[in-house]
Amino acid sequence: MNTVRVGASDARHYRIFKDVPTVNCGLNPYNLGGPDEYIEIEELIDLAKIHTLTAFDYLSK
């Protein structure tokens, strides 16, 4: 299994200290931390759909 380190995520605490598998779902930051950092609009739209459908699924139960 490949491990990707995401600096702004707390998922590592669950993985390392509690041995809980985690998934990070988000945008790919290009030139992270640079003056011309950006994201792809298509990814932003996809992520908005994921959040909307997840909230709908959770709240409709």
Image: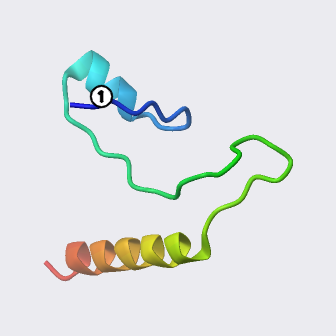
Residue under the image location 33 percent in, 30 percent down: 3
Residue 24: percent from left, percent from top: 37, 47
Decide: is 23 above or below 53.
above
Count the numbered circles shown.
1
Residue that lies at the very extreme toward the left in this rendered image: 61
Compared across the picture, whether 32 is left or right of 58 comes to right
Based on the displayed image, in which of its 4 quarters is residue 34 positioned? top right
Residue under the image location 71 percent in, 46 percent down: 31
Compared across the picture, whether 34 is left or right of 59 comes to right
Based on the displayed image, in which of its 4 quarters is residue 33 positioned? top right
Classify mark 1: residues with Cα within 10 Å, few (<14), some (14-19) or many (20+).
few
Please name the amino acid that badge 1 sits on: Tyr
Decide: is 3 above or below 53.
above
Decide: is 20 above or below 31.
above
The C terminus, quarter of image: bottom left
Based on the displayed image, in which of its 4 quarters is residue 17 positioned? top left
Residue under the image location 27 percent in, 26 percent down: 15
Residue that lies at the very extreme toward the top in this rendered image: 17
The N terminus, quarter of image: top left
Question: For mark 1, what is the residue?
Answer: 14
Compared across the picture, whether 56 is left or right of 60 comes to right
Colouring chosen for the image of the structure: rainbow
Residue under the image location 60 percent in, 75 percent down: 41
**What element does badge 1 sit on?**
helix
Nearer-the-camera pick, 42 or 58: 42
Residue 8: percent from left, percent from top: 55, 37
Residue 52: percent from left, percent from top: 38, 79
Residue 39: percent from left, percent from top: 64, 62
Nearer-the-camera pick, 59 or 11: 11
